[in-house]
Image (cartoon, rainbow, N blue to C red):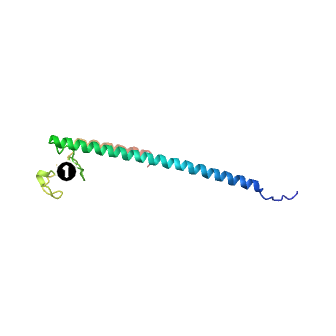
């Protein structure tokens, strides 16, 4: 068998590859420029919409104030909303009361003997089924 000799790449092939790489970089730059312009445009539209909504809100507040309705738009509130569980009634505890102070005792839930027996029987059936299935 004859030995293969390595030949160096022709200079023309390298020049073609460099030209393709240059074209690709230019296309990528153009594409990224278009994407940035679109994003800037969308952000500008979003800001314009937000400004319009703020103007509508302010106009509505001003008109309601002229009608004598100042509490129509409640202020933003932090914490649990009124009516959620574990709520302490303000009239029973006062404004700054600690949790649990002057709170009525929670009624303990009870289950009938029949209900307890039904649950126990269902659990025994599950255990028996599990045991008969091979100890899994």
Q: Residue at x 70, y 53 (%)?
A: 17
The relative height of residue 111 versus residue 102 in the rendered view (above or below) is above
Residue 12: image x %, image y %? 76, 54
Residue 134: image x %, image y %? 45, 47
Residue 70 in the figure: left or right of residue 14: left
**Count of picture labels:** 1
Q: Secondary structure at mark 1?
A: loop
Q: Which residue is mark 1?
A: 87
Mark 1 Cα shell of 10 Å, populated few (<14), some (14-19), many (≥20): few
Residue 112 is at least partly visible in this image: no
Which quarter of the picture shows residue 3?
A: bottom right
Q: Which residue lies most toward the right here?
A: 1
Q: Nearer the viewer, residue 74 or 131?
A: 74
Residue 91: image x %, image y %? 11, 51
Residue 1 in the figure: left or right of residue 84: right
Residue 133 in the figure: left or right of residue 105: right
Which quarter of the picture shows residue 113?
A: top left
Residue 90: image x %, image y %? 14, 52
Q: Residue at x 53, y 50 (%)?
A: 32
Q: Nearer the viewer, residue 12 or 84?
A: 12
From the image, which quarter does the N terminus lie in? bottom right
Residue 41 is at least partly visible in this image: yes
Q: Residue at x 62, y 50 (%)?
A: 24
Which quarter of the picture shows residue 62?
A: top left
Q: Nearer the viewer, residue 119 or 37?
A: 37
């Amino acid at each position: 068998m004859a030995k293969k000799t390595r030949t160096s790449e022709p200079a023309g092939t390298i020049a073609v590859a460099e030209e393709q790489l240059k074209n690709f970089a230019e296309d990528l730059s153009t594409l990224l420029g278009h994407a940035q312009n679109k994003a800037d445009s969308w952000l500008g539209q979003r800001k314009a919409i937000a400004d319009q909504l703020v103007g509508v809100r302010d106009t509505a507040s001003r008109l309601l104030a002229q009608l004598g309705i100042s509490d129509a738009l409640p202020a933003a509130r932090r914490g649990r909303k009124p009516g959620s569980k574990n709520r302490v009634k303000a009239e029973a505890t006062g404004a700054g009361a600690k949790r649990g102070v002057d709170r009525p005792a929670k009624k303990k839930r009870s289950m009938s003997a029949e209900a307890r027996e039904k649950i126990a029987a269902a659990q025994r059936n599950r255990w028996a089924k599990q045991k008969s299935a091979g100890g899994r």
